[in-house]
C-alpha cells in the first residue's frame, strides 16, 4: 500500500520535497542573517 502510494506520487513528491527544502533553507539563511 505504501509503496503503491509512493510510486504514484514519486515524481511530484520529490519535486515538492525539493521546493520545501529550498524554501526552508532560504528562510533559515534569512533569519540567520537578519
Image (spheres, grey):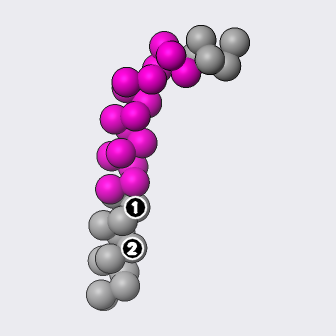
* Residue 16 falls inside the magenta stretch: yes
Q: Is 27 positioned to the left or the right of 4 in the image? A: left
Q: Quadrant of residue 6?
A: top right
What residue appears at the point 46 percent right and 20 percent down from the top-left corner? 9
User: What residue is rendered at 59% in x and 11% in y?
Assistant: 4
In magenta, the rendered stretch is: 6-22
Q: Which is more toward the observer, 14 or 32?
A: 14
Query: Is 31 colored magenta in this rendering?
Result: no
Mark 2 surroundings: few (<14), some (14-19) or many (≥20) residues within 10 A: few
- Report which residue position mark 2 lands on: 28
Q: Residue at x 37, y 26 (%)?
A: 12
Q: Quadrant of the N terminus?
A: top right
**Label 1 residue SS:** helix
Q: Is residue 13 above or below residue 9?
A: below
Q: Quadrant of the C terminus?
A: bottom left
Q: Is residue 18 above or below residue 9?
A: below
Taking 30 as reference, is 34 above or below it?
below
Is residue 4 toward the left or the right of residue 11 in the image? right
Rendered location of residue 31, percent (x, y): 36, 81
In contact (CB < 8 Å): disc 2 and disc 1: yes
In the rendered image, the vertical position of residue 24 relative to residue 13, given as above or below: below
Q: Say the numbered circle drawn on residue 5.
A: none
| Residue 23, image x, y percentages | 34, 57
Residue 32: percent from left, percent from top: 37, 85
Q: Describe the element under mark 2 as helix, strand or loop.
A: helix
- Numbered mark located on residue 24 in the image: 1
Hey, which quadrant is residue 30 in on the image?
bottom left
Q: Is residue 19 left or right of residue 17?
A: left
Prevalent SS, magenta region: helix
Amino acid at each position: 500500500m505504501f509503496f503503491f502510494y509512493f510510486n504514484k506520487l514519486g515524481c511530484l513528491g520529490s519535486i515538492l520535497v525539493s521546493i520545501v527544502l529550498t524554501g526552508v533553507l532560504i528562510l533559515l539563511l534569512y533569519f540567520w542573517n537578519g
